[in-house]
Amino acid sequence: MTDDLEGGYSFQQSFENFSKRCAVQEVSVFTTTVLLNFRRGGNDFVMALTDLSRVLWEKRKSITRTRGEQASSKLVFPMVVIFLVVVVLVGTPAFLMMNF
């Protein structure tokens, strides 16, 4: 983006090119927020970035929570297999020591 600015592009064009190169929704929302407040001016810029930060943080927490739940459900089968192996390893000597 700095290369674009030094190359003669305007601030708006540099940010739009940055957003296109990244192709990430969060970056697109950030650049839109910055450009809207850059054109408008005023004191709402800090509040807009604070709100954007909070929204993106909540989204990231939600995604992390979902991935954690998926990971725990994927680990159920290996845990059951390990439990059965441990039962066999502990139970076999005990079973063999019994006298019928």
Image (cartoon, rainbow, N blue to C red):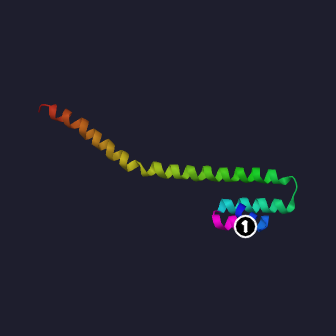
Q: Position of residue 65 (x, y in %)?
A: 56, 49
- 67 or 46, which is in the foreground? 46
Q: Position of residue 54 (x, y in %)?
A: 71, 50
Which residue is the extreme one toward the left?
Answer: 100
Q: Is residue 1 visible?
A: no
Q: Quadrant of the N terminus?
A: bottom right
Horizontal side of 93 relative to 28 (left or right) equals: left
Q: Check if residue 95 falls in the magenta segment.
A: no
Q: Quadrant of residue 86?
A: top left
Could you tell me which residue is drawn at 72 percent across and 67 percent down? 16
Q: Is residue 70 visible?
A: yes
- 48 or 85, which is in the foreground? 48
- The kind of residue tagged 1 is Glu
Q: Check if residue 21 falls in the magenta segment.
A: yes
Which residue is the extreme one toward the right?
Answer: 42
Could you tell me which residue is drawn at 67 percent across and 53 percent down? 56
Horizontal side of 1 relative to 82 (left or right) equals: right
* Number of on-image labels: 1
Could you tell me which residue is drawn at 64 percent across and 64 percent down? 22
Q: Position of residue 90 (x, y in %)?
A: 25, 35
Which residue is the extreme one toward the front?
Answer: 7
Q: Quadrant of residue 9?
A: bottom right
The range drawn in magenta is 16-24
Tell me the SS state at disc 1.
helix
Could you tell me which residue is drawn at 80 percent across and 50 percent down? 46
Which secondary structure dominates the residues rendered in magenta? helix
Residue designated by label 1: 16
Q: Position of residue 99 (x, y in %)?
A: 12, 31
Horizontal side of 44 relative to 51 (left or right) equals: right
